[in-house]
Image: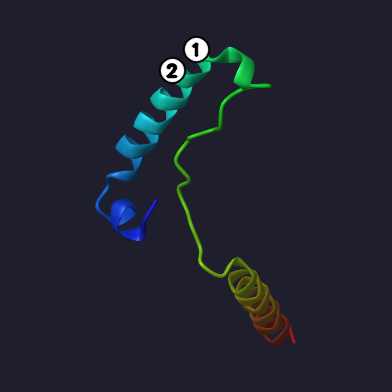
Amino acid sequence: MTPSQRHSGKDREILTRRDRTYQEAQKQNPERWSGKTRDWTPIEKVTLNPQKEAVRNDQNLKEEKSKKMRQIA
């Protein structure tokens, strides 16, 4: 999935077609599949650098706690 496809809203249609394609392939050749097909459910939020975002969120929490402690004191 390209960023452009996600931004233009084409991602859901593409994922639906991929799901249909995999379901058909599984029906035609069940011996090739050891279990279920891939989960093609759309992912709502995508981040490029999730580690950085987690660190940023952690920093924000620390700053909020620090502000609250200063307000209490």
* Residue 12 position in % (x across, y down): 34, 38
Relative to the observer, which residue lies in front, 47 or 18?
A: 18
Q: Amino acid at mark 1?
A: Lys
Secondary-structure class at tag 2: helix
Secondary-structure class at tag 1: helix
At 27% from the left and 47% from the top, the residue drawn is 9
* Residue 13 position in % (x across, y down): 30, 36
Label 2 – label 1 distance at C-alpha: 5 Å
Pointer 1 residue: 27
Pointer 2 residue: 24
At 27% from the left and 44% from the top, the residue drawn is 10
At 58% from the left and 71% from the top, the residue drawn is 53
Residue 56 falls in which quadrant of the image?
A: bottom right
Q: Is residue 73 above or below residue 57?
A: below
* Residue 36 position in % (x across, y down): 61, 22
Q: Is residue 34 above or below residue 52?
A: above
